[in-house]
Image (cartoon, rainbow, N blue to C red):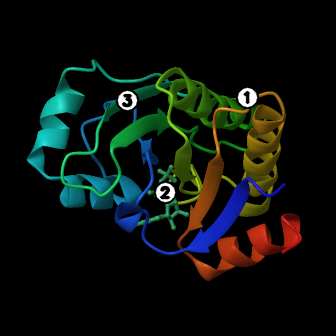
Amino acid sequence: MDRIQLLQGDITEMHVDAIVNAANRSLLGGGGVDGAIHRAAGSKLLEACKKLDGCETGEAKITLGYRLPARYVIHTVGPVWHGGQIGEPEQLASAYYNSLKLAKEHQLATIAFPNISTGVYAFPKRQAAEIAIKTVADFLKNDTSIEEVTFCVYDDENYEIYEQLLEL
Ligand code: ADP
């Protein structure tokens, strides 16, 4: 699938139409990639997020990117891993799907995702990658408006997993 790219690095530096934030339900900032995005975007991002009234797990909301090179930030909330029997895989798929749906609604062509839920939320990395890749590939099969989806991985373990699954 040539519309799916893999890159290792800091998502806050990406020049794309939208980067996706692995946020928490408050949308008021946090650690990990969420903290990095808020630091890089500046305080206007938090001001915008305060108006959104939070976000349910598996849903997504959009703001401008402010000082980021990315024009927009799509804030989505992945599930906290509790063993996998209470809908975590489906919720993770929804987080990817609803982020792409929002990007399409806003006519955005290039989107970058972090590895949602695989940090503090402790979703097993390989299973998360399988869900992420399948959800994105299925979406792109039925859509021509999104030109490129980049998986922006941060840690070496996720990089190796994605490299293997994407057969790069
Ligand atoms: P969650 O709470 O959804 O698990 P985290 O932010 O803790 O969110 O982790 C999600 C993923 O984001 C992890 O794989 C982590 O390595 C990665 N990450 C952390 N900082 C950055 C960054 N600046 N750019 C891209 N990915 C990042």
How would you rate the neighbour count of disc 1 (Cα within 10 Å): few for under 14, some for 14-19, many for 20 or more?
few
The residue that mark 2 highlights is 120
Tell me the SS state at disc 2. loop
How would you rate the neighbour count of disc 2 (Cα within 10 Å): few for under 14, some for 14-19, many for 20 or more?
few
Q: Earlier in the sequence, mark 1 or mark 2?
A: 1
Q: Position of residue 168 (x, y in %)?
A: 84, 75
| Callout 3 amino acid | Ile
Q: Position of residue 54 (x, y in %)?
A: 33, 23
As drawn, is 42 to the left or to the right of 23? left
The image quadrant of residue 49 is top left
Tell me the SS state at disc 1. loop
As drawn, is 4 to the left or to the right of 79? right
Q: Residue at x 12, y 41 (%)?
A: 44
Q: Position of residue 152 (x, y in %)?
A: 56, 64
The residue that mark 3 highlights is 62
Q: Position of residue 3 (x, y in %)?
A: 73, 53
Instruction: For ligand 1, tell me if the residue under mark 2 lies within 8 Å.
Output: yes
